[in-house]
Amino acid sequence: MSMSYITQARAALNAVLDTVEFPDAALRRQITLRPPKEKSYGDLSSNSFILLKSIENIDFNLLSQKLRDAFEKLDGIADVRLEDNGYLNLKYNIIYWLNNIIPVFEEGPEFGIRGMASKKYTFPAPEEVVDLASYRQQVNFEALSRIATTVGAYVERETRPAREAEGFPHTTAIAKCTEAKARFAVLANPPGFIDAFSPILAIDRRYDNPVFAIPYARLMLQRLGATAEAAETGVSDGVDMSVLVLPEEVMLARQLNDWPLALEQALGKRDAFYLASFLQELSLLFFRLVERVHPISSNYLMAEAEGSARHCLLGALDRILSGGVGLLGVDTVREYG
């Protein structure tokens, strides 16, 4: 079981912070290390320099050098840069993201979860499902529980008392969409979606609808047979991932590396919607690649130099999409083109 890049970076950061005598624990908790909102800044960003500079009686220059050294020793680091605004930004080599696709393929939904914080989470769940809002709360609790179990966390149920039914009836939504697609629709959209729920929009065959796009991406991957081919060939036997140079291939590889982050975000925000959004982003990246290379009608997967790496990439995508819909509890949803 592998460890994600952000877990490794946080471990490096904490090793340095453990040498600092903080005036209070709250200040240390304010130090963050996470992807920046603007991707052009890098892959990870930390406010550590800003907050550490506010502590009196420490050798800030020595401490800042220790931080730089710790980050520069991380696998795959291309640049550690202190910005004018005081934030420390980390950028990784493209080959690092590409080489990680092999463990993504081999480990599937367990990729990168080693070392993730195994704490207790409390998630709300309804005492009784009476309408679409309580239905979403229940299926969200079930999905979050599966995600927490995957990363080794403990789940506690926070039961919400029963109330009078409001809004769109969940029984009608299930009857018109099927239970699996109704579940998918309420999880793959933010909570506000249920306030204006439409069975037609919930299962509409559009690429911007996750209930269609994610299963359709899985269907296309199944037709390509990349997973079976990569497994039969043996992805650990010297596959050169550096041959993947198309922008869509690199973007897809980069996004797959964030699987552990998607799990963490869903748990932290107490909403499986964030995992569904991650799977949707992967699906749309895959469709962009398909539009560029037309893998079914071209020799994209049969090229002598790139074939094995491409099978590995698409096989890894297939495993993450399959694992993701399994955690959401919607792995029975199928689309047929």
Image (cartoon, rainbow, N blue to C red):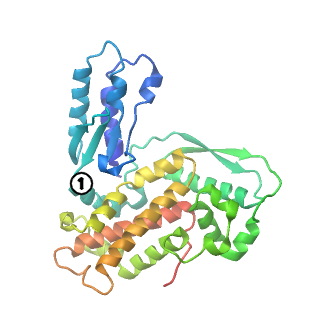
Between residues 237 and 133, which one lies in front from this camera angle?
133
Farthest right residue in view: 164
> Vertically, is 95 above or below 10?
below
> Do we see residue 102 in this rendering?
yes
User: Left or right: 255 with respect to 240?
Assistant: right
User: Left or right: 208 with respect to 53?
Assistant: right
**Residue that label 1 marks:** 96
* Percent position of residue 33, x then y: 37, 38
> Vertically, is 175 above or below 170?
below
* Percent position of residue 164, x then y: 83, 54
Q: Residues within 10 Å of mark 1 (few under 14, many from 20)?
A: some
Residue occupying image coordinates x 47% and y 48%:
264
Farthest top residue in view: 57
User: Left or right: 335 with respect to 93?
Assistant: right
Between residues 264 and 165, which one lies in front from this camera angle?
165
Farthest bottom residue in view: 297
* Percent position of residue 170, x then y: 73, 65
Between residues 311 and 71, which one lies in front from this camera angle?
71
Residue occupying image coordinates x 41% and y 51%:
260
Residue occupying image coordinates x 53% and y 47%:
267
Say how many tags the image has.
Answer: 1
User: Left or right: 278 with respect to 251?
Assistant: right
* Percent position of residue 167, x then y: 76, 61
Residue occupying image coordinates x 28% and y 34%:
84
Farthest left residue in view: 305
Q: The residue under label 1 is which amino acid type?
A: Tyr
- Give the image quarter of residue 198: bottom right
> Do we see residue 42 in this rendering?
no
Q: Secondary structure at mark 1?
A: helix
